[in-house]
Amino acid sequence: MNDYKLSDKLKYWLDKQLSKGTASIIKLLSICVISIVIFVSVVIVLFKLRDGFLEAFWDSLATIVNAWMPSSEDGEAGYIVLNTITAIVGLFFTSILIGVISSGIEAKLDSIRNGNSIVIEKDHTVILGYTLGEHGLLNQLIIATGDKKRCIVIYTDIEKSEIEQDLHKTSISQRTSKSSAGMATSPTSTTCDTAPSTRPESSSSMP
């Protein structure tokens, strides 16, 4: 049986938290910030650099959030040193937070652009599977709709951008304005049971 070190267990736990996404990282950062603020506040109170814990806690929290560097007029040398460290930590965590939020927004936008969103439509047509270069079925469905607007959802593991480029090479792209087409991607199979985002129960047909 493998006897893992404490550092290995901590690294494994941290990797699990980071892999859970943006919300988990923000939660972890918040816990770290509050823990540092409490620690600094306790040290300030123990050395009697401030009158009470609440005052020390609020000053430390404001310093770490605003990344405000204390001046020589703010108190004794020990208080200035502690809050300087707190401000540097605040800059570090603020930079990470901005990067995490930006990455999360970018990932969400990429997911939406790739068609990974729930289809809120009624009487739409669901196509399970798609092969690049084969447009016969899609062409017939668009012709059958006539002048009516009807959503056609393609459930496939092919990226939406690839499908759009494939359709753009044909005459189908000139008629998609009359029949709005949406794509819901899936990494594995193309069965009705594994395609809940396409809402097959409310569709008009699944050819």
Image: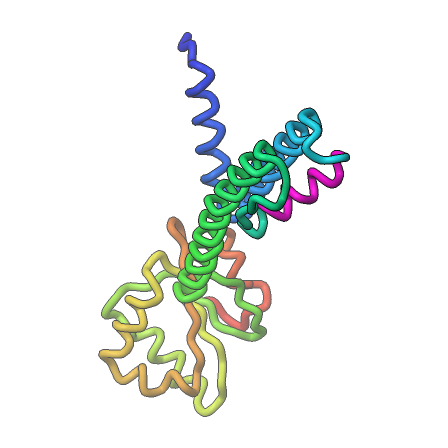
Q: Residue at x 45, y 74 (%)?
A: 152
**Does the magenta segment cover residue 77?**
no
Q: Is 177 left or right of 32, judged from the image as shown?
A: left
Q: Is residue 119 above or below residue 54?
A: below
Q: Position of residue 170 (x, y in %)?
A: 24, 80
Considering depth in this image, is 188 or 55 the residue closer to the camera?
55
- Image-quadrant location for residue 106: bottom left
Residue reaching furthest to the top: 1
Q: Position of residue 108 (x, y in %)?
A: 46, 59
Q: Is 36 left or right of 10, judged from the image as shown?
A: right
- Image-quadrant location for residue 46: top right
Q: Quadrant of the C terminus?
A: bottom left
Q: Quadrant of the N terminus?
A: top left
Answer yes or no: is residue 155 visible.
no
Q: Residue at x 46, y 21 (%)?
A: 9
Q: Position of residue 12 (x, y in %)?
A: 44, 27
Answer yes or no: is residue 50 visible.
yes
Q: Is residue 34 above or below residue 103?
A: above
Considering depth in this image, is 107 or 80 the residue closer to the camera?
80
Predominant secondary structure, magenta span: helix
Q: Position of residue 139 (x, y in %)?
A: 33, 79
| Image colouring | rainbow
Q: Residue at x 31, y 72 (%)?
A: 164
The number of callouts visible is 0
- Image-quadrant location for residue 176: bottom left
Q: Is residue 71 above or below residue 153?
A: above
Q: Which residues are magenta?
A: 52-63
Residue reaching furthest to the front: 73
